[in-house]
Amino acid sequence: MPPAVRFSRDAVLNAAYQLVRREGVTALNARAVARELQGSTQPIFRLFSGMEELKQEVLKQAEAVCRDAMLRRMETSATRYLGMGMSYVLFARDEPELFKLLYMRDRVSDGSCNETDAYEWVFGIIAEEIGVDRMTAARLYNRTWVYTHGLAVAISTKYIPCMTEEALEALLSESFEAAAAQLRVALPEKTA
């Protein structure tokens, strides 16, 4: 009779996710996951083809958590684009190791750099919210997202001290307004 299955695929994935969340992707190895499970490495290799598959599943789970937080934030923000940026920097603040896993890796080599559909979706949001064409929206995105990413990296690496949500929102708003002014785009009046 084969031994009873002690750990499910979800349990192993959750252990790996929690390990990466706490210690970073460099801590992800079979022994560390086994320690997290308080078991052996055997279930990992029975349930996954190897550590690379497990790492990819952790990556997918982190992407889902980040995406869900972004969508929730976009629903409650003054503008969806500001909500997107706020969600990004708050994710960097609250989940620094997951942020590093998702956004501080070589995305060209792993093939995830060509997510043109995602960019088109964002350009559409900007174009709709401020009434510009997609090319202008793309230019606004490029000018603001570099700043937003830099701020998020500085927060996730603790290069700058953590700021309040209000201070972060003011920085992102000012960045967007400055980029719009540089491109001579009139932003809609703010409503109080």
Image (cartoon, grey):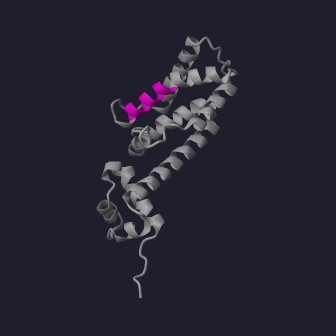
* In the image: residue 54, left or right of residue 65: left
Question: From which residue to which does the magenta span run?
Answer: 145-155
Q: Quadrant of residue 157?
A: top left
The quadrant the C terminus occupies is top right
Identify which residue, 79 or 98, lies in the foreground.
98
Q: Position of residue 50 (x, y in %)?
A: 38, 61
Q: Position of residue 130 (x, y in %)?
A: 67, 22
| Residue drawn at 54 percent across, 38 percent down | 115
Q: Position of residue 164 (x, y in %)?
A: 45, 32
* In the image: residue 169, left or right of residue 137: left
| Residue drawn at 39 percent across, 58 percent down | 16
Identify which residue, 66 or 188, lies in the foreground.
66
Q: Position of residue 8 (x, y in %)?
A: 46, 70
Q: Is residue 190 magenta?
A: no
Q: Is residue 146 magenta?
A: yes
Residue 119, compared with residue 184, is above or below; it is below
Q: Is residue 192 visible?
A: no
Instruction: Count up the numbered dots.
Output: 0
Identify which residue, 92 or 127, lies in the foreground.
127
Residue 86, compared with residue 19, is above or below; it is above
Magenta region, mostly helix, strand or loop? helix
| Residue drawn at 52 percent across, 19 percent down | 174
Q: Quadrant of residue 158?
A: top left
The quadrant the N terminus occupies is bottom left
* In the image: residue 170, left or right of residue 120: left
Q: Is residue 135 visible?
A: yes
Residue 114, compared with residue 7, is above or below; it is above
